Amino acid sequence: MKKNAYSLLLLFLLLFQGIRAQNENGPSRFRAGLTFGAVATDIPGMDIKDNDSDFHKLGVSVGGIVNAYLNQKNSLQLEINYIQKGSSSPPDSGNINYYKFGLQYIEVPVIFKHKLHINIRRKPNDKLELEAGVSFGRLIGFTNIDQSNSPLQINESYLNTTDISLLGGISYDFTQHLSFCIRYSNSVIPVIKHNSIPSYQLINAFNNGNNQVFLFALKYIFGKTKPPHSTLNPASSDN
């Protein structure tokens, strides 16, 4: 699994370097950048106390971005991220029943972004963008800890190592380079194969065993941009 992760990282670095070199010659349709964020995740059916979605499992997401303008309002974005997912149950009033199931993925989201043109206090504003897409992930590691901090008997044969998720969200551009996004994703392939661990109540029900993720991320894009058919010139593209 690590070999696949290193291959993806190398591919992104080569692509990043090519886009960076292109941007040195002026505004370009393509730009590359970095992303860092926090995630709150859950897996329905994994909670040892109830079966609700409480998103107690926290983690991080870090990676790289390649963004391509399609026109003045729309763009496509490719990301390659390391992301932590899973499920967690905090201790109860007796300080027992603690449980944590952690998953580490290399994930490749492919996102369509649409810029919103709205008026705020009678002034035009185009800093908000809607985004939707699909992500493809590969499991590279997992951990299990029960209330006594001893490993639970879950092995890789119980897990689907491929993750495919649908996602949607909204982002706000602070500047041409810096933005913040809130994104929700839900996998369409269960993390744990249904009925592989009967004691975890992973029955064949809608969404049980699937990854659910809320992402809160800062994104920094390098270089200048000149959307297709734009009348901007390099001197005005920083405004």
Image (cartoon, rainbow, N blue to C red):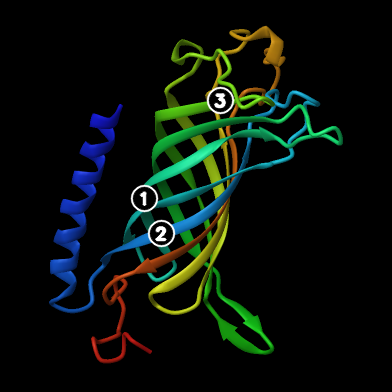
Residue 114 drawn at (x, y percent):
49, 62
The reply, left or right, for residue 29 in relation to residue 171 is left
Q: Find the distance from the CA under tag 3 to the CA under tag 1.
A: 28 Å
Q: Find the distance from the CA under tag 3 to the CA under tag 2.
A: 27 Å
Per the image, the residue denoted by label 2 is: 35
Instruction: Please report the residue visible at 67 percent of the width from the left and 89 percent of the height from the top.
Output: 122
Residue 190 drawn at (x, y percent):
56, 22
Do callouts 2 and 1 mark residues in contact (Cβ within 8 Å)? yes
Say which label, 3 or 1, has the lower sequence index: 1
The reply, left or right, for residue 177 in relation to residue 187 is left
- Residue 69, visible in the rendered structure: no
Per the image, the residue denoted by label 3 is: 144
Q: How would you rate the neighbour count of disc 3 (Cα within 10 Å): few for under 14, some for 14-19, many for 20 or more?
A: some
Per the image, the residue denoted by label 1 is: 79
Say which label, 2 or 1, has the lower sequence index: 2
Residue 235 drawn at (x, y percent):
25, 91
- Type of amino acid under label 2: Thr
Q: Find the distance from the CA under tag 2 to the CA under tag 1.
A: 9 Å
